[in-house]
Image (cartoon, rainbow, N blue to C red):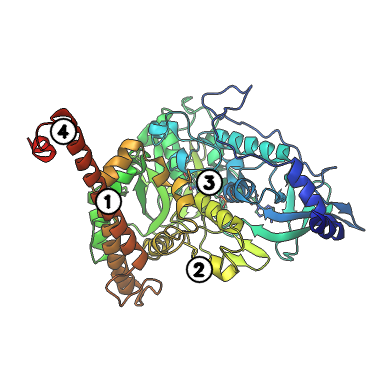
Amino acid sequence: RKGKNERTALQPAALQRCRLAATCHVPRCTGSAPRKGVKGRGRWPDGGTSTRMSRTDGIDAPGSEAGDDAITLRCDYLIVGAGATGMAFADVVLAEGDGSASIVMVDKRPDPGGHWNNASGFVRLHQPACYYGVPSERLEREGDASAFKYEDLSGGGEIRSYYRFLMDKYERGGRVRFYAGCTYDRSADDGTFRSDADGTLYRVEARRRIVDSTYTNVEIPSERPPPFEVDPSVECVPINGLEGMDLSSGKRKRFIVAGAGKTGIDAILYLLNNGVSESDIVWIVSRDAWMFNRDWFNPRTAMLTFPDALTCHKRSFEAYMTEMERIGFYLRIDGGISPSKFSCATVEAHELDQLRSLSNVVRRGRIQAITNSHLIMTKGNPLPFDVDDNVVVNCTANGIPRRPPVPVWQGKKIVLQPVSFCQAAFSAAIIGYVECCPRDKFRTDTDRNNIMRPVPYPVDTRDMIRSSLLSMWNRFEGYGLDSRTKSWCNKCRLLLSSHSSPATTMQLFFGFVLYRQLVAYQKGIEMKMAQHKDEFGVEFELFNSRGPQKSAKLAEAARTVLFVSVALWFVVLALVCIVAYIVFPGRSALSSSIS
Ligand SMILES: Cc1cc2nc3c(=O)[nH]c(=O)nc-3n(C[C@H](O)[C@H](O)[C@H](O)COP(=O)(O)OP(=O)(O)OC[C@H]3O[C@@H](n4cnc5c(N)ncnc54)[C@H](O)[C@@H]3O)c2cc1C
């Protein structure tokens, strides 16, 4: 139209964007077509080592031009970090946006996939693959009912393949350019980044936003030196060092695994599953942790079993955790020790048995130093150490360090953070979805921030109270029940609810399970608010602490679900009456059906 052409003629960048949209629209992927020509155990072959070289030479994003000392790139979004969160955000913008948004992604690493690039092949997801990745593409295998089993969780190699496949797909679509091996200048935070290979400086003019996916700052042990002094004669390896090591050669007598987080657990299970005897493993546990029981996350049954966990209403936090352990939701290694840590680690009952089989568990604080004869601990006596026979597996890292939550939308910037308890990928996806919603749905950043509060990763046990309350608020007062986002959430493959089978859905309504769940959530909120008051000495400010209903939207949802469940039973009864009337035309339908 004339008016439109006039406008675009005045704005060359916008014109380019429109052309791009016309020619390079990426259709929404159903995720059903397997990648051709790749062989592997599952759908995503074990990726092995990186094949991607730095892509910065000669590749410019749409609308680029050379400046004096910097190459200027124009796009709609600059996404810093191509890990799970950056990729999930990009995926939603491409699939749900107006079809025109162009994206520049930049990452220090040579490949997308974030910390999984440095993970060993045997390091796996802790939660089922069907809740991980991006909304548009399945990561789990066919027949995902078994995906919650440890043997079928995606490993580091598969995850790398998955993200490489996605990045190739996005780049082929023409709306994404990936600048690998480049470091974004976080201190200047002005859209500039530099190639690590040749120092080329890039300046990005992001028309819409700069998206920071690095704020949570995941730290994995293989990427940092041991946080203790190590004598040069000592063999101290990260978890990756175990891969390829001949464990059965009998050359080593003892493995000393330092760290009780996800990586430490993975290292111990790997050693045990590869023939190392439990007596040859020493586990240094500085702090015991609570863990999720993976059985509760079975995609086929989770929606039915969760109410059991929700109906556990104990006022004292300690009693609550004990009760949750009794029903099998949370697990710990030693029932006699009260854990002080929770970092979203997830295990299955048989893995817990394996971990419990270790008799050499050392609880003397952290390692301070390793000499050629001893492990110096922060508490208690040093442990004897034999440089010829022992190898230290360093699995210590902060994982996800504590960082103060900040608003997600901040003018030109989006800071990706979890907005759902221990669910990084879904969190980035829902943020992407809200960002894509038309401006008449969300007019301001305040509108957007108002439907989701950051849910910091818990570090200490009592952080779980606040983080789960924030997550519940998002779910029941924020995006989860907000009319603008609710139906997208329910369909998103990264959420539990989207994996219900038709039979489960029937049970949810006909068995009044969903109604019971929603009522249980209301009580759960009340109980957690009381725990919050006890533990932190202040009220949890978001839910209404004075009114009889802590969450008005939740109460309304419960009433609606009850109405639907009852209505469904009436429909069934009516159908029975009709059938009875047809089969027994001479008698009253109701008495026939009753008889
Ligand atoms: C063994 C293990 C198992 C896990 N299992 C699960 C699970 O099952 N489910 C789950 O939800 N979570 C799991 N997690 C948690 C996991 O940390 C998150 O799921 C997620 O991978 C984090 O992604 P991210 O994008 O935030 O961070 P990252 O993966 O660290 O990505 C951030 C990226 O930003 C890049 N970057 C940082 N700074 C810059 C800069 N200045 N310039 C350019 N690039 C930069 C980094 O190179 C990195 O690639 C697991 C973690 C571990 C260690």
The residue that label 3 is drawn on is 372
Of callouts 3 and 4, the N-terminal one:
3
Mark 4 or 2, closer to the camera:
4
Of the pair 7 and 16, the residue shown nearer to us: 7
Q: How far apart are marks 2 and 3 (CA)?
A: 56 Å
Mark closer to the observer (1, 3): 1
Mark 3–mark 4 CB contact (< 8 Å): no
Amino acid tagged 4: Ala
Which mark sits nearer the N-terminus, 4 or 1?
Answer: 1
Residue 439 falls in image quadrant: bottom right
Dot 4 crowding, Cα within 10 Å, few <14, some 14–19, many 20+:
many
Disc 2 residue lies near ligand 1 with CB under 8 A: no
Q: Could you say whether the residue bearing mark 4 is in a helix, strand or loop?
A: helix
Q: Distance between the residues labelled 3 and 4?
A: 86 Å
Task: Find numbered disc 1 in the image and state the secondary structure of the residue it sits on.
Answer: helix
> Residues at badges 4 and 1 in contact (C-beta under 8 Å)?
no
| 70 displayed left or right of 346 | right
Q: Amino acid under label 3? A: Asn
Pair 3/4: label in front: 4
